[in-house]
Image (tube, rainbow, N blue to C red):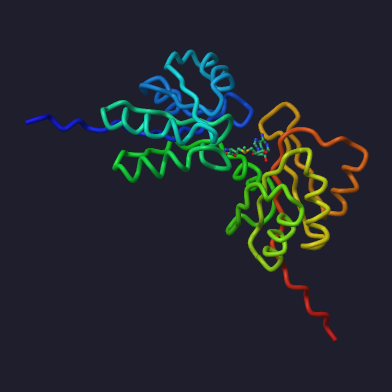
Amino acid sequence: MPQKTTPGTLYIVSTPIGNLEDITLRAIRILKEVTTIAAEDTRQTGKLLAHFQINTPMTSYHDFNKEGKTPVFIQRMQKGDSFALVSDAGTPSISDPGYYLIRTALSKDIPVCPIPGPVALIAALSVSGLPTDRFVFEGFLARKKGKRDKQLEALKDEPRTLIFYESPYRIISLLNAILTLLGDREIVIARELTKLHEETIKGSVSQVLNDLKTKKFRGEASIVVEGYRPKKQSQT
Ligand code: SAM
């Protein structure tokens, strides 16, 4: 009778969002132990691996090759190989590639194991000073203004703290849309977290827009916005 092979594991490994010290001991061990590391960008991950003297073979895995690569990885895991999925920064599958591979692995009864660590939205929320007990992560809104504005409008009565990712090139446009569609709420721009030029810019949306008027916005940023607060009734 043919022997049944135990499938390998798919590890979802969080990596630093800037500061290389923000990697867990377990992440380093798993990256050393797996058969293959599937990386969003092998050049970027190559720097991380070199820093920690990890010599595990790498292969690329991103949105444009996921349909070709997924069945290959699955077949290898079914034969016992283990894979670590990493993205350029933070936690894979959080506004990054991973979802398709994870779903497919689960559907084939391949164990999927998290190796938790940095994720920009949580780092931003944790220093925002805005309520952290309940929050909504919206990731990147649509690039097209009309669609983006509809997404924002749908959030206008949302009482939980809102968190967005945005590219530095579109951030001013997003802040203007928030001001128009959600009002002049308290907001925190968490910029370049864990990096040399880490900064949190806090204030009302209009104050922040005013502060940013004179500077060119650079770097990676997560945006944390106060949830909807019904206006206090004026006392008579
Ligand atoms: N998977 C990542 C995570 O776990 O946070 C997110 C990847 S997503 C492609 C990149 C976005 O995350 C950036 O555009 C920015 O909004 C946010 N981000 C990443 N690094 C950051 C940092 N150091 N400081 C603030 N925001 C960051």
Q: Position of residue 230 (x, y in %)?
A: 73, 72
Q: Residue furthest right?
A: 214
Q: Residue at x 80, y 51 (%)?
A: 175
What x and y, as percent, mark residue 14?
A: 50, 33
Q: Position of residue 148 (x, y in %)?
A: 72, 54
Image quarter of residue 149: bottom right
Left or right: residue 38 compared with residue 108: right
Q: Quadrant of ligand 1?
A: top right
- Horizontal side of 95 relative to 101 (left or right) equals right
| Residue sitting nearer the eye, 103 or 215 | 103
Residue drawn where x is 45% and y is 28% of the image:
27
Q: Residue at x 44, y 13 (%)?
A: 55
x and y, in percent, of residue 177 in the image: 80, 55
- Looking at the rendered structure, the number of numbered marks drawn on it comes to 0
The answer to whether 81 is drawn above or below residue 163 in the figure is above
Classify the position of the C terminus by image quarter.
bottom right
Q: Quadrant of residue 124?
A: top right
- Is 211 situated left or right of 196 in this image? right
The outermost residue toward the left is 1
Q: Quadrant of residue 71?
A: top left
Residue found at x 54% / y 31%: 87
Residue furthest bottom in the image? 236
Please state which of residues 139 and 205 is positioned toward the viewer in this rendering: 139
Is residue 73 or residue 22 the one in the foreground? Answer: 73
Which corner quadrant holds the N terminus?
A: top left
